[in-house]
Amino acid sequence: MNRFLDLADFSRDEVKDLLGLAARLQSHPDPQALAGKVLGLLFLNPSLRTLASFQSGMMRLGGSVFVVTPGQGTWQLETRNGAVMNGAAAEHVREAVPVLASYCDAIGIRMFAEGKNLEADMTETQFKMMADLCNKPLVNMESAMNHPCQALADWYTMDELKVPERGKFVLSWVNHPRALPLAVPSATVHMAALRGMEVVVLRPEGYALPAPIMEKARQAAVSSGGSLRETTDRGEALAGAHVIYAKEWGSPLHYGNSEAEAKLRGNLGDWCVTDSWFKTAAPGSHFMHCLPVRRNVAVADEVLDGPRSVVVREAYNRMVVQMAVLYKMFRSNSGQSRGRRS
Ligand code: CP
């Protein structure tokens, strides 16, 4: 495997193999597997889990890591092609990325959506530009429209919890003080569809996920024997749910227009998950969220502190599955991998 950019680059069986490798490394640690290897991590946006879990996972496999967060002890980086660099940024990614790549054996990059132009963000213009600058194995640590490491960890978590593969998975929009990117909902809806689940996207008017995101997930559902639909009817969506996965995202109708978006969101304060959301859920249902989460805005304390919440487990499993990704990337980088972009 040379690149881990999108779960859609792998078949369902390939994902299951990767999850099997994660389980094996979890039960049978291999502390020298990546001795002598160096992983570089470039964060153009903040993180807690991704930052810590990649470092911890790499060290648990015997490898080494360096982290670069531009503007925090390193030069601020310019990302715009053709920019006249007379502002704060002292260095362009066109030099910085190849330089960093030359110091390591694989690199992870986090670069969120610009949030100005939906079409540009949908086509991953920025992340593709960064990927083209990098001649080393590359991991997507969250781009404009994808978060494959989160999706993989969430699949692993559901397997651990024995959530039925044909179970009902409700991805619900929840409230947030500002419009957040589409990366996690996009990756999540695809992941659950590829797992073969009955996927329901629950959201208020104006928050439908863009058609290409739904279409990509629909194709995954067809290939896996699952299904996908969306609704604004909370009662209907939550009935019989095995998993309620909450996520905040901005309205695609007002992409890049924070004022209009805030107005639309103004009366949606009741889109905060409470225990009452689970009244008609399946017995033993679970609550999931990728974190970070705003307590009592997106999700009530009673849910996050209650027995249904598996959010800390999901975060722990980020490390578990990323160890498998790194292991496969470093150890089987000789053509055995069947990832379609490998
Ligand atoms: N879920 C997730 O990616 O968390 P961080 O933004 O803290 O890395």
Image (cartoon, helix red, strand yellow):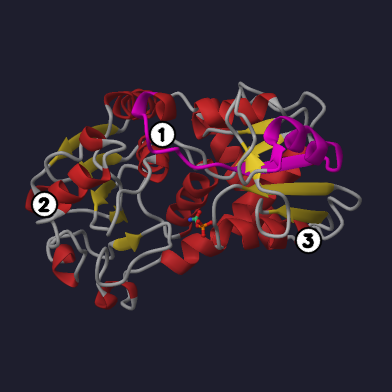
Amino acid beneath label 2: Arg
For label 1, count other residues whose C-alpha is less than 10 Å away and answer few (under 14), some (14-19) or many (20+): many
Residue at the location (65% across, 43% down)?
Answer: 89
* Tag 3 residue: 59
Which is closer to the viewer, label 2 or label 1? 2
* Tag 2 residue: 234
Q: Position of residue 130 (x, y in %)?
A: 64, 31
Residue at the location (23% across, 64% down)?
Answer: 283
Residue at the location (71% across, 59% down)?
Answer: 55
* Tag 1 residue: 194
- Mark 3–mark 2 Cα distance, whole angstroms, equals 44 Å
- Mark 3–mark 1 Cα distance, whole angstroms, equals 31 Å
Image marks 2 and 1: residues in contact by CB distance under 8 Å: no
Q: Position of residue 334 (x, y in %)?
A: 82, 27
Residue 22 appears in the figure: yes
Q: Secondary structure at mark 1?
A: helix
> Within the image, what quadrant is residue 119 found in?
top left
Which is closer to the viewer, label 3 or label 1? 3
Q: Position of residue 195 (x, y in %)?
A: 41, 39
Magenta segment includes 142: no
> Within the image, what quadrant is residue 15 found in?
top right
Range of residues picked out in magenta: 90-119
Amino acid beneath label 3: Met
